[in-house]
Image (cartoon, grey):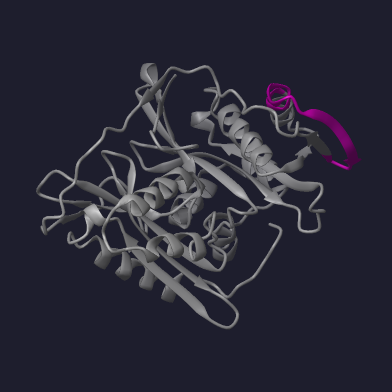
């Protein structure tokens, strides 16, 4: 397997299995994955569902939303998407335990991979990312509830824990299920991912702000509700999609560019630091980003948050991308999300 790295990404990777003719995009999960998560669940056998959900045999709309609308300041989920079919191949996540102490944060971890993508190291890769994300977020203990007959998951968690330098302990054996705790090493250096050959897939681009028309291209993501490309005659391609935990570096670069420009946008620094959250929260808000596909840099961002008493919205476009109509698209999309996809503020442990 060859790992192709996206320039400004922490988690976004392409895993290329040349001998199988397979290419998987690995990235954080977003609300755009509603349909993919539903189809992923339906593609699992009864036995696979039982192993994953401890007996759950259905996944209603509210449950799908709960899985895909993530507050990344608390929780984390990463998916692998088959580039050829735009369908989920696997997913892994951790969810904060609601009553865990701030001094000792506890989260529950899980991973699932469809049968046709198993025995390729994908589950190990995704779960390794979850352990790494949890440790970076200050999680002290990951918890896994594993059916006693699910030997494959037991071995997988054990291997990843050893790779992460985590202490492993079985704390409860109740009926058919065992509860395992994995105590993470505090500030140890980042986990080494699976041994792969790294390669950047992004290149730099100089963009002029000459007004131009664009075509809307949805062919790359046929299962997406929100994800689409704006294709300009100049060759510029801008991807509009929900933000995710992988956009931290892009937001930092966006802010740095705004500070350095002489464009009269002095309020932009205030807007980004005071209005935009450190991590997207899709439980009571929505955030879109516009990404220059060639440079892998942020061209614009739109953010909406609904509080108990008021609502906030912000749309920002980098100076060199203004006048192209990107702001209009972001405004339209964030208004659509605000009216159709943002729930009343609520917190839940799962």
Q: Residue at x 70, y 23 (%)?
A: 159
Residue with the most extreme bottom position: 309
| Quadrant that contains the C terminus | bottom right
Q: Residue at x 52, y 17 (%)?
A: 195
Q: Residue at x 48, y 50 (%)?
A: 244
Residue range corresponding to the magenta coloring: 159-178
Of 232 and 33, the residue lying toward us: 232
Residue 128 left/right relative to 218: right
| Quadrant that contains the N terminus | top left
Of 54 and 305, the residue lying toward us: 305
Q: Residue at x 53, y 60 (%)?
A: 277
**Any magenta on residue 52?**
no
| Horizontal and vertical percent position of residue 134 | 66, 41
Of 350 and 323, the residue lying toward us: 323
Q: So how many labels did they put on this image? A: 0
- Up the image or down, 345 lies above or below 42; here it is below
Residue 102 left/right relative to 219: right
| Quadrant hosting residue 177 | top right
**Residue 107 appears in view:** yes
Residue 284 left/right relative to 198: right
| Horizontal and vertical percent position of residue 139 | 73, 43
Residue 75 left/right relative to 224: right
**Any magenta on residue 170?**
yes
Residue with the most extreme front position: 262
- Up the image or down, 281 lies above or below 339; here it is above
| Horizontal and vertical percent position of residue 318 | 29, 55
**Residue 290 appears in view:** no
| Horizontal and vertical percent position of residue 278 | 54, 55
């Amino acid at each position: 397997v060859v790992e192709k790295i996206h320039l400004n990404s922490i988690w976004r990777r392409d895993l290329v299995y040349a001998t199988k003719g397979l290419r998987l995009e690995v990235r954080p999960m977003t609300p755009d994955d509603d349909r993919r998560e539903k189809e992923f669940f339906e593609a699992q056998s009864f036995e696979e569902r039982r192993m994953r959900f401890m007996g759950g045999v259905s996944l209603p709309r509210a449950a799908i939303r709960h899985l895909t609308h993530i507050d990344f300041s608390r929780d984390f989920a990463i998916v692998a998407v088959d580039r050829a079919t735009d369908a989920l191949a696997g997913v892994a996540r951790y969810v904060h335990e609601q009553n865990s102490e701030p001094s000792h944060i506890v989260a529950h971890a899980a991973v699932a991979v469809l049968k046709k993508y198993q025995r390729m190291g994908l589950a190990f890769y995704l779960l390794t990312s979850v352990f790494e994300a949890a440790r970076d977020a200050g999680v002290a203990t990951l918890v896994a509830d594993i059916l006693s007959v699910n030997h494959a998951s037991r071995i997988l968690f054990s291997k990843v824990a050893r790779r992460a330098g985590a202490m492993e302990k079985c704390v409860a054996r109740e009926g058919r299920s065992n509860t395992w705790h994995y105590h993470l090493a505090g500030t140890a250096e980042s986990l080494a991912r699976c041994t792969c050959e790294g390669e950047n897939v992004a290149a730099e681009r100089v963009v002029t702000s000459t007004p131009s028309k664009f075509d809307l291209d949805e062919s790359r993501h046929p299962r997406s509700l929100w994800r689409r490309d704006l294709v300009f005659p100049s060759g510029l391609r801008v991807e509009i999609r929900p933000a995710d935990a992988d956009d931290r570096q892009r937001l930092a670069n966006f802010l740095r560019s705004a500070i350095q420009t002489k464009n009269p946008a002095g309020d932009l620094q205030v807007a980004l630091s005071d209005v935009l959250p450190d991590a997207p929260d899709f439980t009571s808000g929505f955030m879109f980003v516009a990404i220059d596909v060639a440079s892998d840099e942020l061209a614009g961002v739109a953010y909406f948050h609904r509080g108990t008493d008021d609502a906030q919205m912000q749309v920002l476009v980098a100076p060199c991308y203004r006048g192209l109509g990107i702001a209009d698209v972001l405004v339209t999309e964030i208004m659509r999300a605000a009216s159709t996809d943002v729930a009343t503020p609520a917190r839940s442990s799962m």
